[in-house]
Image (tube, helix red, strand yellow):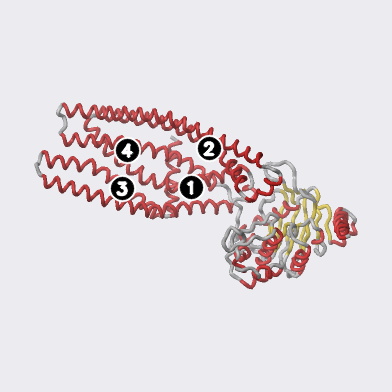
Amino acid sequence: MRKIWLFIKRICYLIGLCAKESPKMILIDGFFGIVVAMQSLLYIIIPKLILDALIYDKDGMRAILLIVALGVGEAIAEHVLAFISDLAGVYNEKVAHDLLLRLSEKATRVNYGAMRRHEVIDKYQQAQNATFGLENKVAVLLCDFFSNIVKFVTIFAVVSTVSGWMALIIVVLVFAKMFVMDRANDKDMALRIRDNSENVHYGYVTELCQKLTFAKEVRTYNLKPFVLNKFENSKNRKLEIAKERIRVGGISAVLESFMDMLMLAAAYVMIIVRYIKGAVSISIFSVYLTAVSEAYHTISEIMRVGVLLRDTNRQVEQYIEFMDFPEQTSLKQSDGSVGVVDKPLVVEFRNVSFKYPGTDNYVLKNVSVKFSPGSKIGIVGENGAGKSTFINLLLRFYDVEEGEILLNGKNIKEIDYDEYMKLFSIVPQNYALFFFDIYENIAFDRKDDKRCDSALNKVGMLEKVEGLTWKKNTFMSKWFAKGCDFSGGEKQRFAIARSFFNEAPIMIMDEPNAAIDPLAEKKINDSIKAIGRDKLVISISHRLSMTKDCDMILVFEDGEIKEKGTHAELIELGGVYREAFYTQARHYISEAV
């Protein structure tokens, strides 16, 4: 009983969701179902009226008028259905996009750390797969299911007047067929889950075979046999699943066909026997024959739609599972403001320790540090020392569980998340540039040519951009007609320009000079120096030349701040920083010599 209640609840949830996105879709699909049902019933009723007019009333004119009415009604119904179908397609497509958009918006509100966990990624992918076609399932529910239920109730009433036994046989065979289809659907669903899981791997190896992104590695390391072997293995696994689905479907189809044959045979025998005995007239006989034939097709359609709705129930469950996933904490003050933006920003880590979910080792251990307003902070250390985690916590990609991070004395968890993120301009280590034009990559939807030019100039790219045929309207890929490919260093400078354009009070740069030549690096460093004293700049870099002019340098080691101070203070200290700095300096000098 609980399963039935959940099934009804989820189907109602889906209908309500679609109605919220597009009420017209629900009305149009519902009207379509009514027209289809009425169209089918006319073919049962009007032939009887025509036979009655000819045989009993001897009224040829009425029979002709009924035939004409049937033809005209059919023509009108077909045109109406075609129009409604086209109109429904437009609204169904709108709902499909809206459902996917809701899912994408939800993903942006889920904690960043959670979205990196496998089980959450798996839920998101399942929800994405479930989203495709959900709107069509609603259309099927409102059109096919509704119209066939109306037809079946009417037809069953007609058939039951002929013979209660015939009605009972039909009901028994219907339930038997439903049982067979249900078992087959269970097995098929399990196989589809396996197939969906394999599709992730298959999609990736197919991409390896097709995308130019991997061409250099494939050619350089002669990976063709390796990649093709991966592809073959995945393809074979998918083939085995497909064969098993065909086997299960074939057995089910044979059993269903056998029960269909019994259903039709029993119905026709009983009708013919009653006609021979004179229990029914020729016109009633015609109605019964048509009704039985329609009953057979209607029952098959109801079962097909029933299986489809059962599948839909699982899709809705997957959609709801992700949509109900806990979101990033977002607390607003009573006045709706952050409460700290209008002041010089003081950032403080107080006794912060952190380990990633599902792990036992601390990545940060009892970190305490305070940044003065407008400071230029450099963060250095070996890979895995905790530098990026430090930044991830400040950006609330993960929430601190031990200790606290304060902004002007307020725990950042108590600040509205969306407003809090407006305080930052970020150049992540793995930055993303989009295949839009240069202007949109830097400014997005904020139109300000002057600021955009200023940002490009600060990273030394304005002259380059102005020399392009389409200037700032050049797309960031040759895949587009007005596109252009840029070097890795140029792309990185565009990413940095984006952060300059944003003009947020806190700028965070994670390895901003990794792919940049020394001259471009100097220009960017000079631009950072010129930033007003009201802005806090935090830079992570392995190239220590970028940290020389910082107000404070943090040296991370094994999750702890090993050393802290200015460049001069750390050189005088003679510790880890000094050794790393002079090692790099000797390397550059030896290269120059």
How far apart are labels 4 and 2 at the CA level? Answer: 30 Å
The vertical placement of 434 against 446, above or below, is above
Secondary-structure class at tag 4: helix
Q: Are the residues tagged 1 and 2 within 8 Å (C-beta)?
A: no
Q: Position of residue 276 (x, y in %)?
A: 16, 27
- The quadrant of the rendering that contains the C terminus is bottom right
Q: Residues within 10 Å of mark 3 (few under 14, many from 20)?
A: some
The residue tagged 3 is 34
Total count of labels: 4
| Lateral position of residue 492 relative to residue 277, left or right | right
Nearest to viewer (mark 2 / mark 3): 2
The residue tagged 1 is 132
Nearest to viewer (mark 1 / mark 3): 1
Q: Sequence-wise, which precedes: disc 1 or disc 2?
A: 1
Q: Sequence-wise, which precedes: disc 3 or disc 4?
A: 3
Secondary-structure class at tag 2: helix
Q: Sequence-wise, which precedes: disc 1 or disc 3?
A: 3
Residue at 28%, 28% (x, y): give it: 265
Q: Nearer the viewer, residue 221 or 58?
A: 221
The vertical placement of 146 against 537, above or below, is above
On residue 587, the disc is none
Q: Position of residue 292 (x, y in %)?
A: 26, 34
At label 1, which amino acid type do we have?
Phe
At label 2, which amino acid type do we have?
Ile
How far apart are labels 1 and 4 at the CA level? Answer: 27 Å
The residue tagged 4 is 298
